Amino acid sequence: MMRYWYETFAIADVELRKLIRDPTELFSRAIQPVLWLAVFGQVLSHVRGIDTGKAGYLAFMTPGILAQSVLFSAIFYGIAVIWERDLGIVHKLLVSPASRWSLVCGKAVAADFRGLVQATVIYAVAFIMRVPIRWEPLPIAGVLLAVALGSGIFSTFSLIIACIVKTRERFMGIGQVLTMPLFFASNAIYPLSIMPPWLRTVATFNPLTYLVDALRGLMVHDEQSVYGLGYDCTILVSVFVVLLAIAVRIYPKLVQ
Amino acid sequence: MTSNDFAIDIHGLTIKFGDLTAVDHLESQVPYGVIFGLLGANGAGKSSTIKMLTTLLRPTSGSATVAGFDIVAAPHEVRRRIGYVPQMLSADGSLTGYENLLLSARLYAVPRVDRRPRIEQALNFMGLRDSADRLVKTYSGGMVRRLELAQSMLHKPTVLFLDEPTIGLDPVARHEVWKHLNDMNREFGMTILLTTHDMEEADHLCADVAILHAGKLAIHGTPAQLKAKVGELATLDDVFAQFSGAADDAGRLKDTADARRVARRLG
């Protein structure tokens, strides 16, 4: 068991060294959620067109935008994996005696780090915009855990897509097609209660919905989780485990 | 003979992709401690063979052992005993040379106390000590290849697989890689299997060569034996042309050999 963790750490460590050496991607990925909160959020909170309870629209959408930025920064992870395949790096990893679980989990852990940076940026923007954030240690720890779980889910999902489509061009097409439906068919920027029934049904099969719901229950005052934190966590952990199991089986096919 | 008598022992190895049979009932044995060249035209089945032997591809039928372990029944044991250098320059350019080596040492479970000495030894062996802390994207092609050789030797593999190790390198870098491969073979007794299109490379490095044609073994022997089979003044290029399917009529080969003989007489 220790061996698995050690190998996972080795893979994640490499990714972190690269990110720290060249953090451009982290900064560029932070621009979009800042715009959503500072522009879209502010305008919509003045319109008061969506009934989101007493905390206000900005407080309602802040956890949604955090979940969105977790999704967007993790979903294109597969392109890097295809790039590594083209360079022969994946071949070398798969010929090593390291466990396939570790190789896949290492990538997910590295994606977690990206997600946690996004969370820090959004906490800072929310503080500046006077969103009623819960600053107690326990809710913050819960948010960071949920973000790590969400990053793991979407990066592993992205890895699976990469193993299926196998080329960067196809991946770009699929990635674009997937991200916006995942985002809009969730409760990120509007509550489940105002969705038409068909969309609400779709949203219940979308893991982003449960990530947003968990974050909403943990991150801001006067907002609550619809499903309950326990239910959200069960769904998210189950989805992650299933995706990991698929990724471990499919990852070697990337080089075949 | 048991599988333990050979570093690589291949029996009826076959892989099919749909209707295409990429490797067709391949039979071959590679003794321990030799440098073995797997030659063949593009699409002859070299890469598929190397992928099966390194456990990246599962054969459709047949069997093979590497370092005494079956590639299908005990892939993990095989992986622990082999090194692999793919055709692409695959060291990570965003990391330093040392960091690339550190990753390999961790993934191959080199014990923590041995890690630094082994990395230092590999860097010295490949003449890369002064460049260890530079990002690999600033290395020349030859340096990247030497770094990859350094990565592949950290865990002291029994068998090292190289897919076109000098492709794209300038002549100086190519000779450096040859020298290091010879040194690894001599000093550590490492069995090396390499694929190449470069007949000079095969002639210079390999004690044994096999030529594949359409997924089948066309011919196998020492470079001298193969050249003798084709003709008195034949080169390994001539052997390749005859057995790899690159030249179909013997007349053309004869013409080439005659022309070469005339040129030699004329000085």
Image (cartoon, rainbow, N blue to C red):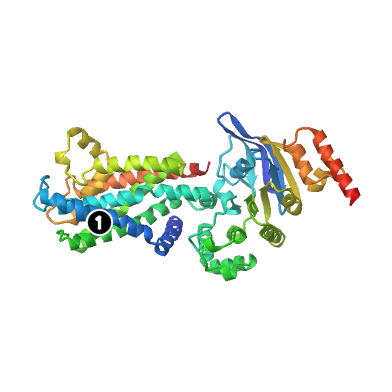
Answer left or right for A93 relative to A143: right
Place of residue A66 in the rendered image (x, y in percent of width and height, measured from the top left): 25, 53
Element marked by disc 1: helix
Answer left or right for B6 relative to B47: right
Residue at horizontal 57 percent and vertical 41 percent from the top: B72
- Quarter occupied by residue A165: top left
Place of residue B196 in the rendered image (x, y in percent of width and height, measured from the top left): 68, 47
Answer left or right for B229 relative to A9: right
Write down the chain letter for disc 1. Answer: A
**Mark 1 packing: few (<14 Cα in 10 Å), some, or many (20+)?**
many
Place of residue B158 in the rendered image (x, y in percent of width and height, measured from the top left): 64, 55
Query: In this view of the protein, which residue sits in the foreground, B37 or B93?
Result: B93
Q: Residue furthest front?
A: B266
- Residue B218 in view in this figure: yes
Place of residue A245 in the rendered image (x, y in percent of width and height, measured from the top left): 40, 44
Q: Residue furthest left?
A: A54
The residue to which callout 1 is attached is: A34
Assign the N terminus of chain B to one quadrant of the image. top right
Task: Report the number of numbered marks.
Answer: 1
Query: In this view of the protein, which residue sits in the foreground, B71 or B40?
Result: B40
Vertical side of A124 occupied by B240: above or below: above
Query: In this view of the protein, which residue sits in the foreground, A111 or B139?
Result: B139
Q: Residue furthest top?
A: B19
Answer left or right for A77 relative to B180: left
Query: In this view of the protein, which residue sits in the foreground, B82 or B215?
Result: B215
Q: Residue furthest right?
A: B265
Residue at horizontal 16 percent and vertical 58 percent from the top: A131
Residue at horizontal 40 percent and vertical 64 percent from the top: A20
Residue type pointed to by label 1: Val
- Residue B105 in view in this figure: no
